[in-house]
Image (tube, rainbow, N blue to C red):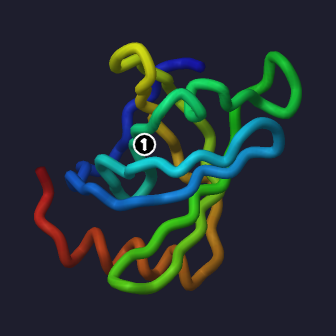
Amino acid sequence: MGIERRIDQRIGSEIPAEAECAFGPSPYVTITNISRDGLQLEGNGQLVEMRPAVHGTPLELTVHFGLSGQPVHFHCRAMYRQALDNDRSRLGLRILSADPVSSARLQDFVSDHRFI
């Protein structure tokens, strides 16, 4: 995974979510910051165990959570992984695609919140 920074500023958050990939666990995580083009997740050992479908390819996953009381779903690519302690890690994601409703809800959320 190469390091690539998000273009848009990030909004600090503590949004519960589920991260789903083709192989391995689908852990419950916390979105610790969010922007128009990316998410940062934190979670336990199950987040560390997530692997790409094909060895040597980027890890891609779908993240499900709620914004303003409504469900949203984003297909993302992992850009970095960082160990926090023995059983916790952080994953930086770039949003690759979303349905039109999820995209609109994200844009509204970002517009309505103050940047950190």
Q: Residue furthest right?
A: 54
- Judged left or right of residue 44, residue 114 is left
Placement of 77 over or under 39, stated as above or below = above
Q: Residue at x 48, y 59 (%)?
A: 17
Q: Residue at x 80, y 17 (%)?
A: 56
Callout 1 secondary element: strand
Question: Percent x, y for residue 40?
Answer: 39, 42
Tell me the amino acid under the disc marked 1. Leu
Q: Residue at x 67, y 31 (%)?
A: 50
Count of labels shown? 1
User: Which residue is disc 1 drawn over?
Assistant: 41
Placement of 89 over or under 103, stated as above or below = above
Is the N terminus in the top left, top right, bottom left or bottom right quadrant? top right
Residue toward you, 104 or 27:
27
Q: Quadrant of residue 21?
A: top right
Question: Percent x, y for residue 70?
Answer: 45, 85
Residue toward you, 56 or 83:
83
- Judged left or right of residue 46, residue 10 is left
Question: Percent x, y for residue 42?
Answer: 40, 38
